[in-house]
Amino acid sequence: MKAKNPFKTGSPAAALWAEIDPAALPRHVAIIMDGNGRWARRRHQPRMAGHRGGVRATREIVESCARIGLPVLTLYAFSLDNWKRPRAEVDFLMRLLRQYVRRELDYMRRNNVRLRVIGRWQELPAGVAADVARAVEETSANTGLQLVVALNYSARAELVDAVQRLLEESRSNGLTRVDEATLAAHLYAGDLPDPDLLIRTSGEMRLSNFLLWQLAYTEIWVTETLWPDFSTRHLLQAILDFQQRERRYGGLSPEEARAERKARALGGALLHR
Ligand code: FPP
């Protein structure tokens, strides 16, 4: 029997959850949170208001992922390219990030959430990096949701960093051959499964230098909804749609393989008549 519905009786989230197979949840959902600026512009507000709205959405989505027992959630919070934004916006984002990490630490402790960070986050302003390091350390033994935040992240830089580490190992231990598993293990969070589902908000059809290696076979779900308006209902819809997709990893579905065997048998019989 299905466990108790974790959402409020009668809510759209509860209705969607009732349709989801909890045994077939994605192991890892990654999200490109986009559209904070447009959300603010539509309201004739400064971009900062959009980012605040983005934090509210982030909080709700993290809580829902923990509640439904999702193993891994990766959020694209700040890219290496985001330094190109006006100084005031970057400073604001840094303050927001610091606030988020500090305020959510208590929630993460109480709810068994483990915070992890990917990207060149040590290069962030010292205070931000210190708060992030503290939260990562203090939640490191938690065994529930792994919340992976991409900070000062670029997928190409991640691949460069992985290759750099491999070169260093080759000097120290004589490593001479690399296969896919070795490279994957040298990524920032090389122990995690690849995302099964990538969500992108605000309708853009781009990967924006996010997890390029890890997304090779990931199902992509794009919504026009802007990140500050993204809620549990959208997350559950994405998971439900994901459960209806057929993943073939370059092969054939069981149904296609059956039809092909049948066609061959029939074709063979006709050919030899
Ligand atoms: C995209 O909106 C979002 C970002 C640049 C990342 C910032 C994310 C948040 C503030 C959410 C909170 C997350 C954490 C972990 C604190 P955009 O500014 O690119 O929007 P636009 O494309 O409409 O201009």
Image (cartoon, rainbow, N blue to C red):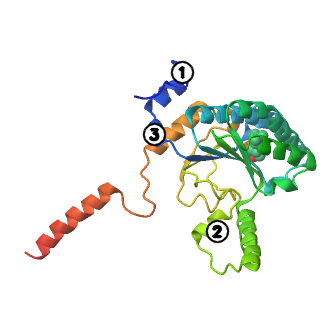
Residue 97: give x, y in percent of width and height: 82, 41
Quarter holding ligand 1: top right
Name the residue beneath numbered marker 1. Answer: 11
Q: Earlier in the sequence, mark 1 or mark 3?
A: 1
The N terminus lies in quadrant: top left
Q: Secondary structure at mark 2?
A: helix
* 2 and 3 marks in contact (CB < 8 Å): no
Cα separation, mark 2 vs mark 1, equals 44 Å
From the viewer's side, name the closer residue of 131 and 201. 131
Name the residue beneath numbered marker 2. Answer: 183
From the viewer's side, name the closer residue of 58 and 103. 103
Name the residue beneath numbered marker 3. Answer: 23
Cα separation, mark 1 vs mark 3, equals 22 Å
Q: Earlier in the sequence, mark 2 or mark 3?
A: 3
Residue 234: give x, y in percent of width and height: 57, 35
Cα separation, mark 2 vs mark 3, equals 30 Å
Say if residue 44 shows up in the picture.
no
The residue depicted at 44 percent of the width and 32 percent of the height is 19
* Mark 2 neighbour density, 10 Å: few (under 14) some (14–19) many (20 or more): some
From the viewer's side, name the closer residue of 234 and 97. 97
